[in-house]
Image: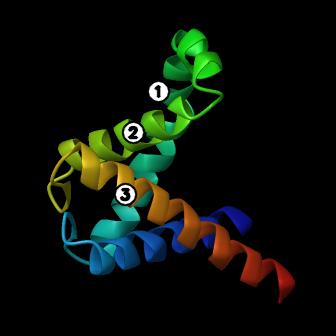
Amino acid sequence: MGIIIAWMINALALVLVGYLLPGVYVASFGSALIAALVLGLINTIIKPIFVVLTIPVTIVTLGLFLVVINALMFWFAGSILKDFQVDGFWWALLGAIVYSIITYVMTSILIRI
């Protein structure tokens, strides 16, 4: 049951990001559910490969390059889905940061309840 709640939180966070940022487009809540699922799969399968391959850059930048990797994963999800689109790298960077903050806040609130 916890994974379904986390999925819903991520989808709602994507809808909020689409509402807050003009460079991120989410067509509907159903599209956000699919995008949240795809983002989860990308972050589970592809992101660890990028993290391992970029360890030297991550060490040099004191871990800040991980934010760039998150943005690239967000942008990639936007490029493969029709109803979830990201207009460019900078919108993906800002979208990934806002998405992470919203998800963190919503999860923290639900844990306290």
For the residues bearing labels 2 and 1, Cβ distance under 8 angstroms: yes
Disc ID at residue 61: none
**Circle 2 is placed at which residue position?**
73
Identify the amino acid type marked 1.
Ile
Q: Nearer the viewer, mark 3 or mark 1?
A: 3
Horizontal side of 81 relative to 104 (left or right) equals left
First in sequence: mark 3 or mark 1?
Answer: 1
Q: Where is residue 109, by image quadrant?
A: bottom right
> Does residue 60 appear in this view?
yes
Instruction: Locate the N terminus by quadrant.
Output: bottom right
Q: In the rendered view, would you say 98 is above or below 55?
A: below
**Circle 3 is placed at which residue position?**
94
Q: Write the residue at 58% across / 25% down.
A: 61
Disc ID at residue 46: 1
Q: Nearer the viewer, mark 2 or mark 1?
A: 2
Q: Position of residue 35 (x, y in %)?
A: 35, 57
Identify the amino acid type marked 2.
Met
Task: Judge the density around disc 3: few (<14), some (14-19), many (≥20) Cα neighbours within 10 Å.
Answer: some
Horizontal side of 112 relative to 108 (left or right) equals right
Q: In the rendered view, would you say 32 is above or below 85?
A: below
Q: CA distance from mark 2 to mark 1?
A: 8 Å
Q: Where is residue 107, by image quadrant?
A: bottom right
For the residues bearing labels 3 and 1, Cβ distance under 8 angstroms: no
Q: Write the residue at 36% across / 37% down.
A: 72
Q: In the rendered view, would you say 10 is above or below 50?
A: below
Q: Write the residue at 54% across / 60% down.
A: 100
Q: Position of residue 84 (x, y in %)?
A: 23, 60
First in sequence: mark 3 or mark 2?
Answer: 2
